Image: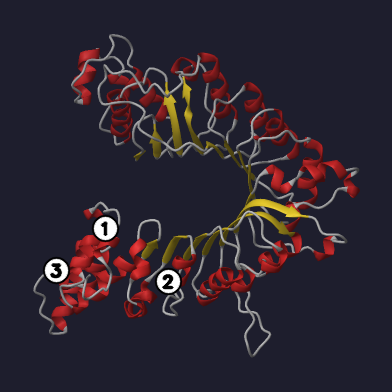
Amino acid sequence: MSPSSGMPERLFGRKRSFNGSCLVSSSVLWDNVWAFFNMGVVLRTPLDIPELRAQIRQFVSIADAVACSQVCKDWTDDFTSVVWHTIDFGLHETFRALDPQVVTRNGHRIRIIRRLQNALDISALQNDSICNLVLLSIHTMKSRTLIQAQCNRIIHRNLATLRALDCILPGSIAEHTQSFPVEGLAPRSATSSVTIASHLTTLTLSVYHISRTRFSEILKASPALQSLTFVGQLYPQEGESRAAFYQHPGVTYFASSVEGIFPPSWEDVCGSASDDPFTLLAHFPKLKTWSTWTRLDHAPEPIKREIARSCPEICAFHTRIWGDLMVELLSRALSQLTEICLASSNISLKTASAILTHRETLTSIKNFSKPFAIYTTDPQQDTSESITIPDRRQSTIINMIPQSCARLKTIHLVDEELDMDEVERTTWVCQNLETLFIRIRYLDTKKKVDDALWLWASARRGQTDIGRLDKLSASQLDDECAAADSHESRSSIEVRVARHLLQFEKLSVVWLGTKVYSA
């Protein structure tokens, strides 16, 4: 136990790497030194400057923060906040056993609570000093009224600071226990009927069944809400009308399954456009980004009508849907999209054609995959067996997108591969391209990727003449790139890639199979 922080050293977190470039600049440092000198304060070391300690504490591990907090009172104030900043009950099980007085002294320093799972975890947070949370994650499978009331009190106590709430609730919640999280977000004062405003901007709600009335109350209780992820389904109520719905004016991002938005029962009763029952989309008239997924087939026409009626301002579509439904949504239900994000899979010709219906407005094409190091450091070793190398026809399909979309700024397709022969036969019209994440055929080792990026960066700085390099032999090119291995005795794929990248003056972030490079 740290005597000054009160936090058991078993609560150590993952060590953060230190980057000296993130420290305050030397000019700021000496300005502070001079200010202390004028005040008659003698600095024994640079670490006596509070601003410098504030920068350093962002990169220390929990263990180091505990040690630093014991140096002196000033250091205690600076580094104890690191120890208490985040409590993850999946890692910090000993938090439940802490002396309540220790929590009372330090609870105001807690900003993030993750994986709040059971009654013991929830009881440990009933201390009134825990009142400055910005993120709260509640993953409880218990529907008891007492537990929900305790969670509501935690939310209520942190309304002034809470910005993100993640709730995974029991599989089915009875109507009489559905006060959570509404009573926490919009509690009534004991002496006044005035609702205390919530500042929540991001909400994730996972519940099997919830009534439309309760869903509307949650939206109404969150006036600052901008982003909502909903996993579950509404159950119908007799006599409900559109006038009873709450349409949130601030939600611009909504994620839910197709079944959650358009349940099978909804499709069964759909008739003409005027007879369609209202879906979840009806709550978000200002929706900009719609993220959805499904494993079932759905008729596209009713979905198209509901999008046009309820949220015609959608301009970004994130989907894990494949097949005819996705093609229909892209080509017929949605118009003038600026951003499209697809599931991690090869893009078909039908999908590419549907994407190109938005060629006049599209600025970003992505998939959900994150960039990772595909290629090894050994040029003789084969690439990862988990990577499927697309054929030339697939490269032609992908190349259609930058060839046709003049407004494109972001290409983030880490599962796709381009063939430079195909690329060089065409012209990319996206001259404002800023971000490129894609693989290149034959650029298949870490060394080749690094050489291509080095040539591109060097030529942008005016230090390398790509035209001259294109005439060098393989061994000369190796010397130019300061590489240890020889290239193929043919026109260098690295030079060809670098020359292509140089066409885009605004290009600043590139991934070609290893690490992300920022110019």
Kindly indicate whether the residue at mark 3 contacts the one at mark 1 (C-beta within 8 angstroms): no
Left or right: 60 in relation to 190: left
Task: Look at the image and tell me in which quarter the C terminus lies.
Answer: top left
Whole-percent x, y for residue 398 in the image:
55, 24
Tag 2 secondary structure: helix
Whole-percent x, y for residue 93 in the image:
36, 61
The amino acid at mark 3 is Pro
Tag 1 secondary structure: loop
Q: Nearer the viewer, residue 179 or 487?
A: 179
Q: Marks 2 and 3, Cα distance to the nearest angstrom?
A: 39 Å
Q: Return the residue at label 3.
A: 46
Left or right: 502 in relation to 229: left
* Mark with earlier residue (1, 3): 3
The amino acid at mark 1 is Phe
Question: Closer to the camera: disc 2 or disc 1?
Answer: 2
Q: Residue at x 31, y 9 (%)?
A: 490
Dividing the picture into quadrants, the one containing residue 234 is bottom right
Left or right: 436 in relation to 6: right
Q: Return the residue at label 1.
A: 59
Q: Return the residue at label 2.
A: 124
* Mark with earlier residue (2, 1): 1
Q: Residue at x 78, y 63 (%)?
A: 245
